[in-house]
Amino acid sequence: MLEEIKGEKDPTVLDVVAIIKNGKKVLFHADSPMFEYQRTTKKREQVDVLPRFIPLSDNIPVVTDVIRHTSRANISLQTLVKGRVELPENEFDLTFVPSQIFRTYNIIRDGFVNIEHIHVTVDKDTFGLLNVMLSLSQMKVVEKMKDGSVSLLLNLINIPVISRQMTANVSLDEFKSLSTALIRSQGIVKGIKASVPTEDRKPLTMENEYGVEAAQWLSSIGVRDYGFIPKSKPRETTNHYVTTEVTWKLKGISSLPSVKEVMAKVEAKKTLTTREKLVYNGVTKAENVDDAQELLSTHQAEVKELQHLLSDMVFTLIIGKTWFAGEEDDVNTVVRVEDKDIPLTIEKRRVEVEV
C-alpha cells in the first residue's frame, strides 16, 4: 500500500487520469515498448472460434472513460478500439461487420500503482494542463506533432496517489450527503427512463443496417450496437491476496422498484414508501418537460459525478488509512448513521481477492 501522501495541493494520480479522461482525444499506446502492464483480474482464455474481433491495423485505442471500483481502491482507464468482427457461417450472408471493443487498463490496484509508465498522445489543451501540473520527473515529452498534439510518457510511479487535502476532507456528514443524493438521482433516472421511448435511448445501427433478424442473431453472438463482447472462459484460480474494501448501503433501499409498480400504487392512491417516492420523483419531472431525453442525460451525468465523488472518498479512506472522526477505527468496523428517512451503514473489512 502506498503510504506516501505529499503536500496538500500536490497533483495526484487521480488528477492526472481525470485530465486524460476529459481530453478532446487522448490516444493510449498499449503496444508501446515504454508501456508495461500487470493484469489485475482473473485471467480468462479467449475462445478461439468465430466470431473474432480484428482491430484496424492503424487504429490506436482512444481513452473514453475512467472506471472506478465502488468499494476498493481501484482505478482503470477505459479505451475504445475500432475494428471488425469476423463472423461464423450464417443465413444472412454476413462475413464481416464493422465493430469496436472496449479494453480497460488498471492504473491503481488496491492502493498500488499498477502501471508505472503510460504512453499517451494528447491534444494541445490537455498537454497544457498536464505541463503546468507535472514536473520533469513525472512527465516526459516524447514527440510534438504538427497538429499540436503531443506524445507523452507519464511516470505515474513518481506521482502521489492522494494528497493530504483529500484525507482532511473525509467527513461522515459528506459521505451521508453524497450517498443520499446518489440514490435520489438514481431514482429520478429510473422514473424518467419510462417517459423516454426505447428507440430514443438506444442506437439501432445493427437493426437499421442488417434488419431485425440479423441484428438479433448478431446480438446473440456478442456483436451489439455498442461493441463486441468476445466469448471467453475463466482460467483456474491459482492465487489470492488480501485487501481492504469499504461498502455502504442505505436501509430499505437495496434496490429501486419498477415504474410500473410505483404507478400502480399512485393510481390506487396508496401511500408510497421512501424508495417508491424516489422513482416517482423522476416520473413527475419527466411529465413537466418537453424533452425527457435531455432531462435524462442531465441526471445520468449527475449520477456519474456523484458516483465518482463517493469513489474518491472510499479511495481516500483505504489508501490514506484514515477513518471518520469520532468513530472507532479497526481492520473490520461498521458505522451506522441513523436517519428517519434513509439510515446509512458504512462497513470497512478485509477481503480475499482471487487472481
Image: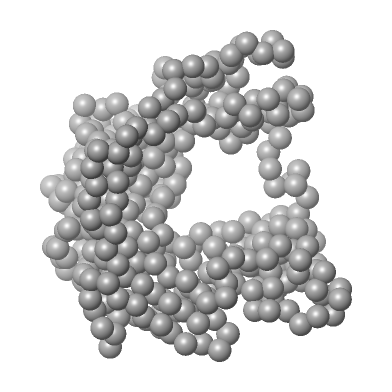
Q: Determine which quarter of the picture holds residue 334.
A: bottom left
Q: Determine which quarter of the picture holds residue 217.
A: top right
Q: Determine which quarter of the picture holds residue 47.
A: top left
Residue 214 lies left or right of residue 106; in this view the side is: right
Q: How is the image coloured?
A: one colour
Q: Is residue 296 visible?
A: yes
- Report the number of numbered marks: 0
Residue 71, placed above or below residue 55: below
Q: Residue at x 37, y 44 (%)?
A: 77
Q: Residue at x 33, y 39 (%)?
A: 42
Q: Nearer the viewer, residue 172 or 63?
A: 172
Residue 153, placed above or below residue 66: above
Residue 300 position within the rendered picture, expressed as x and y whole percent measured from the top left: 59, 59
Q: Nearer the viewer, residue 330 or 40?
A: 330
Residue 276 position within the rendered picture, expressed as x and y whole percent measured from the top left: 69, 73
Q: Is residue 118 visible?
A: no
Q: Residue at x 58, y 16 (%)?
A: 87
Q: Residue at x 25, y 58 (%)?
A: 243
Residue 252 position within the rendered picture, expressed as x and y whole percent measured from the top left: 57, 75
Residue 212, placed above or below residue 285: above
Please identify the quadrant where the N terminus is shown. Answer: bottom left
Residue 324 lies left or right of residue 217; in this view the side is: left
Residue 22 position within the rendered picture, expressed as x and y whole percent measured from the top left: 43, 50
Please identify the quadrant where the C terminus is shown. Answer: top left
